[in-house]
Amino acid sequence: MAEYIPSLKPCTTCEHGNKKHEVLFYLAIYLVSFATGGYKPCLQSFGADQFDENNAKERRQKMSFFNWWNISLCCGIFFGVTLIVYMQDNVAWGLGFLILAITMAVSLLVFICGRPFYRYKNSPLGSPLTTLLQVFVAAFVKRNLPSPSDPSFLYEVSMSPDKSSLSHTDRLRCLDKAAIIEDDGNDGQPASQWRLARVTQVEELKLVINMIPIWLSCLVFGVGIAQGTTFFIKQGSVMNRRISKHFEIPPATLFIMTAIGMVITVALYDKVLLRYVRKSTKNERGINILTRIGIGMAILVIAIIVSALVETKRLTSARNGVKLSAFWLAPQFLLLGIGDGFSLVGMQEYFYDQVPDSMRSMGLALYLSVIGVGSFLSTFLIIVVNKLSTKKGIGKDLNNSRLDYFYWFLTVIFVVNLCVFVFLARNYRYKNVQKRVSDVNSGEDM
């Protein structure tokens, strides 16, 4: 609209932008954020829900769903940072946005046409957060009651054949009091849900509480992801990006190497390595979810170290009046993509699989928050570094900044975070599900 409607076109000769144009710009940005936060977690969980967990073949296919979801996402990134960016830089910004708008409209139409063929799961009425709050309240009300030594004395009801229940665990025993049956003389009348909870509901609350340390550790990883779309691109903008005399790569197109690294990693793991890993670990998933995330975090540390070394070399060349080739950035972009192929896919699986069944969309929203909050934390760290730096910080001109020092600072943070994550992962207990089929794994061990 801002490109094709004359009254909305920004003034190219004015010193300061018009307020109307600023409002339009921020409105578009926030609409994209609002839409992304609304549809992405629901769409991913809805796609994974199309597989029947009680069918052995479909269950194995479901374990590859997030792999192929991310390959499809990277294909979109491939065209976005090549074709669209080239058109916006060399033809017209409006044409690039128009192509994206038409693509989204066609995607929505295809999605709507598939409605008769989708599988829909019956969700419980009410908010799942209410159930968690009820467990808290019931446990607090009965906090003075002694906990039974045998968990079989705790309240549970038999589930229907198509539903699953969670087995009792010994952690956070104080919450078990919510499932203690009181002799309050109600003459057989059912107790209030605010005074009595099922073991499965108690275990669901334990799952959410146990996920909080893992989520906090993943936020630090989100800081590393943010570097790929910020400082990595900015490094490329001050380097030699020419392939020939008549063609120069746009800075944003450099991110294609991250997409390539992720596609190769995910496809290679799913189609080649997975069958051998399953045989060696005797685990349908291959490597455990948290192990996969940890591998990605370790690769991120290597990527940031490489970034620091490349930036030091770029600064040395710039001081000598030589522009370093942008292809020196290829290793850090590729390593970032390889790490994402392990960590991002692992996080999607973790936040989908380890939350209560009724909270899977909220679980994937937590995954997206890792990326969003990670970007905010990255900005916060930059502000802190610039405030505390007595010499050169990180300014608009990278040639007069010390971005390499910032990368080394991030390396220390990521190494410490990796150690914390390994500790959390080794002590983590996966969701222990009891299902009606005999061939379903009840849980995982790190």
Image (cartoon, rainbow, N blue to C red):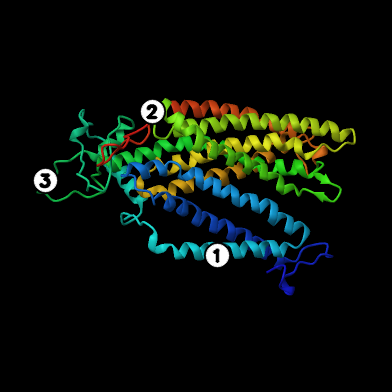
- Determine which residue is flagged by label 2: 282
User: In screen coordinates, is 292 left or right of 116?
Assistant: right
Q: Residues within 10 Å of mark 2 (few under 14, many from 20)?
A: few
Q: Which mark is residue 125?
A: none
Question: Tag 1: residue type?
Answer: Val
Residue 79 image position (x, y, % from top left): 65, 53
Tell me: residue 3, above or below residue 155.
Answer: below
- Quick one: quadrant of the C terminus? top left
Counting residues from the start of the chain, the first of labels 3 and 2 encountered is: 3
Q: Which residue is mark 1?
A: 106
Which of 49/190 is in front? 49
Instruction: Tell me which residue sits at (34%, 33%) in the image.
Output: 443
Q: Secondary structure at mark 2?
A: loop
User: What residue did someone put label 3 on?
Assistant: 185
Who's the residue at 85% across and 38% down the image?
323
Kindly identify the amino acid type of the residue bearing the numbered disc 2: Lys
The front one of 76 and 125 is 76
**Point 77% across, 48% down: residue:** 249
As measured in the structure, the alpha-carbon distance from the residue carrying label 3 to the one carrying label 2 is: 51 Å
Residue name at image x 79 percent, y 37 percent: 401
